[in-house]
Image (cartoon, rainbow, N blue to C red):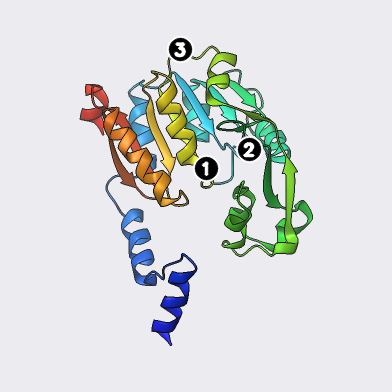
Amino acid sequence: MIKLLKKICGLLGFKLIDKNLIKNDRLISKFSYHTLNSVLSKIFANNLVSFVVQIGANDGERFDILNKFLKKYSPKAILVEPIIKNYEDLKVNYRGQNNIFFENSAISVNNEINFLFKVEESKLELYDEHIKGISSFDKSHLLKHGVSRSHIKKEIVNSISFEELIRKYSINKLDLLMVDAEGYDGKILIDFLSKNSLRPLIVFEYLHIKNNVFEELTKILFSKNFYFYKIEENIICFPKENEVLKNLL
C-alpha cells in the first residue's frame, strides 16, 4: 500500500517525506546556536542596518521577527504588503514610527501578479494564526495548508516591479532585504539580483519556492559572489566582499 501511494504521488509530481525528517529539522533549528533572531540582533546591534526593505510584511505583528528591531533601532524601512486588510493593520502596528514607509503593492516580475488568493475574512477564525499570512498567487499553496477551497477568495492587488520600487523611493543603498512571498520569493530575488547593483544582506523563506526556480536562484547567488546558508526556514545571503558581515555571521 505504501509503495502504491508513493508511486501515485510520484505520478502527480509529489514526494512523500518522512515525518521524522521534518520534526528533526524543526527541533535542530529551534536549539541551533545560530537563529534568525541572533543574526538580526548582531547586525542591528553593530549598527550595520540603516535601510531595510521587507517584502511580504503582512500586518507587522503576527510572526514578524523584524518588528522589534525596526522599533528599537529606527532604520529607514519600506514595508511592502499587497493585501489591503493586512496593509491597514500594518500601518496601525507601526503608528508613530516616522522611519517607516508603506507600499500597498505586490512585487511582480513582468507584471504577472495582479491578484492574490487569501482566506476570506469571515473564515479566518476557523484557522490558526499562521493562515492569515499565507496569501499567495498560487491557490494550491493555501489548499496544501489545509484551507477549504470554499474559504478561498481572490483579491485584486496593486503590483510594482522591484526596479519601480527602487526608483519610487530613490533607493541607492540597501542594507537588509527580507522576503517572505509564499513561494514567489525566488522570482523576486532572481529579478532583483539580475537588474541592479545593490548588495544587501538578504533573508528569504525558501520552503515554498519551486525547485527549478530555487536552483536558478542559487546559481545566481553564487555567480554574484554571495555566501549563503540555511537558518530555520530561511536562507541568509551576504556579499563575499563584506568582511564585517563575514566575521560577524
Q: Nearer the viewer, mark 3 or mark 2?
A: 2
User: What percent of the width, then of the height, locates residue 8?
Assistant: 47, 76
- The local secondary structure at tag 3 comes to loop
Q: Residue at x 41, y 68 (%)?
A: 15
Taking the view exactly as shown, the residue that stands out farthest to the bottom is: 1
**Mark 2 sits on what residue?**
113
Disc 2 + disc 1, Cβ < 8 Å = yes
Residue 20 placement (x, y as % from top left)? 35, 71
Residue beneath disc 1? 184
Q: Element at badge 2?
A: loop
Q: Measuring 20% from the left and 29% from the top, which residue is drawn there?
A: 247
Q: Quadrant of residue 239?
A: top left
**Residue type beneath disc 2:** Ile
Q: CA distance from mark 1 to mark 3?
A: 24 Å
Q: Residue at x 34, y 46 (%)?
A: 231
Q: Amino acid at mark 1?
A: Tyr
Image quadrant containing the C terminus: top left
Which amino acid, mark 3? Asn
Q: Secondary structure at mark 1?
A: loop
In this view of the protein, can residue 65 be seen by the observer?
Answer: no
In the rendering, at what x and y percent does residue 191 appear?
46, 30
Residue that lies at the very extreme toward the right in this rendered image: 122
Q: CA distance from mark 3 to mark 2?
A: 25 Å
Q: CA distance from mark 2 to mark 1?
A: 10 Å
Residue 127 locus on image (x, y percent): 66, 61
3 and 2 marks in contact (CB < 8 Å): no
In the picture, the quarter occupied by the N terminus is: bottom left
Q: Which mark is residue 172?
A: 3
Q: Is residue 75 above or below residue 118?
A: above
